[in-house]
Image (cartoon, helix red, strand yellow):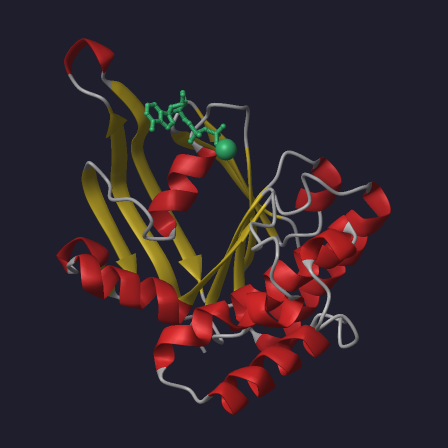
Amino acid sequence: MTAEKLIELRGLTKQYGNGEAAFLALRGVDLMIHRGEFVAIMGPSGSGKSTLMNLLGCLDTPTSGSYQFKGIEVENLNKDQRSLLRRHALGFIFQGFNLLARTSALENVELPLLYRGYSRKVRHEMAREALASVGLPDKERNTPSELSGGQQQRVAIARAIVTNPDTLFADEPTGNLDSKTTLEIMDLLHHLNSERGISIIMVTHEDEVAARARRIIHVRDGLISDDIVTR
Ligand SMILES: Nc1ncnc2c1ncn2[C@@H]1O[C@H](COP(=O)(O)OP(=O)(O)O)[C@@H](O)[C@H]1O
Ligand SMILES: [Mg+2]
């Protein structure tokens, strides 16, 4: 069976600013990622990792070049269609967790379901199931400040997967965590990748974290300088 294409970039560029202030953050990136891959993106600060992630996650639009997600040319989608694609097919995790502060874990996880026409009961059930699947069945009522960093990131992961996305984007997901908690979060991401088939694309600057991915892409000065499949 040939692997299904998930992401295909051709000559992708991103320019910030104009005229004198213009800066080319991505300088023509070609990249193919197949469904089910677990990819780490590494590179020095300012090399374009977050820019690339924002484009892949349809949070921003490229200056030129082509981005196909599952064969769909993202450029041809309007703003509403892009946000639908984001809400239905993509999940996001961030270094700073980005949870609502005075809101319980359960309600945080329910947020992406709010505008989908599910009943309250179904939303609760889906959020409970997501929290259980990240190992936090007993923290439904706790607010973020009552949880450890690792637990907060688990809640954020539950929120990202409650919509059953194909693809999870994670920008430095373990950047705020100690090394033991980092390993636990990596185990969880591994599990989501291997057991649920969720494709994962993760930015990290930590070698031990990147080593857990099957493929490591190095970005340098707005271009992919290395693309290594480790196993
Ligand atoms: N909104 C922006 N406006 C202008 N320049 C930006 C903007 N975002 C990023 N840049 C620049 O683009 C380059 C790549 O940034 P970024 O993708 O955030 O790098 P990384 O995530 O690898 O640290 C950097 O030089 C950064 O200063
Ligand atoms: Mg960055």
Q: Is residue 70 visible?
A: no
Q: Is residue 168 above or below residue 2?
A: above
Residue at the image position 63 percent from the left and 47 percent from the top: 173
> In this orientation, which residue lies closer to the viewer: 229 or 161?
161
Residue 125 percent coordinates (x, y) = 59, 87
Question: Number of callouts in the render?
Answer: 0
In this rendering, would 10 be left or right of 140? left
Q: Is residue 185 above or below residue 204?
A: below
In this rendering, would 17 be left or right of 121? left
Residue 75 percent coordinates (x, y) = 17, 53
Instruction: Kindly give the residue lying farthest to the right in the view shown.
Output: 180
Q: Quadrant of residue 96?
A: top right
Q: Quadrant of residue 85?
A: bottom left
Q: Is residue 153 above or below residue 112?
A: above
Q: Is residue 175 visible?
A: yes
Residue at the image position 26 percent from the left and 51 percent from the top: 67
